[in-house]
Image (cartoon, rainbow, N blue to C red):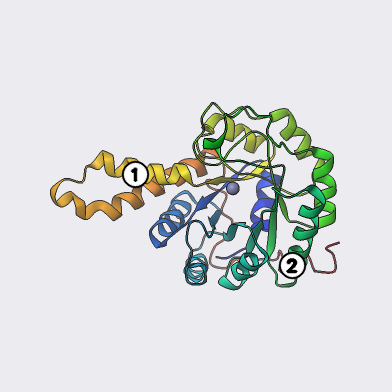
Amino acid sequence: MLVSMAEILKKARKGGYGVPAVAAVNELSARACVAAAEETNSPLIMLCGYGHNPDMDYFGRILNDMATKTYVPVALILDHSATYEEAVKGIRAGFNTIMVDRSKLPYEENIAQVKELVRIAHAAGIGVEAELGHVGVGENYKVDGISALTVPEEAVRYVEETGVDCLAVAIGTAHGVYKGEPKLRFDLLEELAEKVPVPLVLHGGSGTGDANLALACRKGISKVNIANDLFKGAYDKIQEVGMEGNNIYALFPMLELGYKETAKHYMKTFGCAGQAWTGKQYVSTDSIPDINEAK
Ligand SMILES: [Zn+2]
């Protein structure tokens, strides 16, 4: 069942658990994600960006169709839209949340661009996630926990002025594989969770470690983006099974199984297994704030 991401995250924040936003980049991986949520009775957030699948017009419709058909609550987010055009295309493609990433821009410019897209998205009943501070790419630098962290006072004003529905924060994680050991700033997370009125999001979940991520979820992170580890889970599974001879026919089923098992692992680790609230009779009462409410 397609529900708003705001509704999933509001429940997660209240319940003190996190929800993995799992990368669904083609039909195989999307099916694995839906199956993982159904088998663990979890709310599901599927993310996809243009870097994962360039044919978003088509793939967005596939995701939307899958979300509508399953009984677990599902939200779809266009990840890291970098331009105005990408964001609007994502809305048209069937995503019910868009991430508008202007985290490399100066603070005021970030606010101005995100605020404009919030007005457009909310008018269309679509939620918006934005990023403040900057979550970089792990391979590009040694993780030292001091690169472009989110400043709490800036985050409070940012949310007020833009009207975003949730905020991705930089507390020491990085995208993709890490060069060093990630050191999360839990003290900063506690302060952000206390001061920022919308649910908080962590990008770069892969490779951060189960203990770190579970603690982050308990301390106020409501959504953790996972991509790299899912791909690795799929790859490891075909290595484990072996693809010699006619085993090659198991290639796609085993990729899907490895992907699904990794997704289920994170649903259990973050505490969202068993938290799906929808059934066949469920009707969502939640909605995205009216355009007039967004400042
Ligand atoms: Zn990201």
Amino acid type, callout 1 = Tyr
Give the residue drawn at x 57%, y 70%.
94
Q: Which mark is residue 189?
A: none
Along the line of sight, the residue nearer the viewer: 122 or 53? 53
Instruction: Look at the image and tell me in which quarter the C terminus lies.
Output: bottom right
Residue picked out by circle 1: 235
Report if residue 72 is visible in the image: yes
In the picture as drawn, the residue positioned furthest to the left comes out as 245
Vertical position of residue 259 compared to residue 146: above or below: below
Element marked by disc 2: helix
Give the residue drawn at x 51%, y 67%.
56
Residue picked out by circle 2: 122
Among the 4 quarters of the image, the one containing residue 28: bottom left
Amino acid type, callout 2 = His
Give the residue drawn at x 42%, y 60%.
26
Q: Residue 140: x, y in percent?
A: 55, 36
Question: Is the residue marked 2 within 8 Å of ligand 1, measured from its CB?
Answer: no
Give the residue drawn at x 73%, y 28%.
187
Vertical position of residue 24 compared to residue 151: above or below: below
Vertical position of residue 121 compared to residue 248: above or below: below
Q: Residue 135: x, y in percent?
A: 64, 41
Q: Residue 23: x, y in percent?
A: 49, 52
Horizontally, residue 258 falls left or right of residue 172, namely left
How far apart in space, not on screen, are marks 2 and 1 (Cα)?
Answer: 39 Å
Query: In terms of sequence position, does the residue under pointer 2 or pointer 1 come before the other?
Result: 2
Vertical position of residue 141 compared to residue 203: above or below: above
Q: Residue 40: x, y in percent?
A: 47, 48
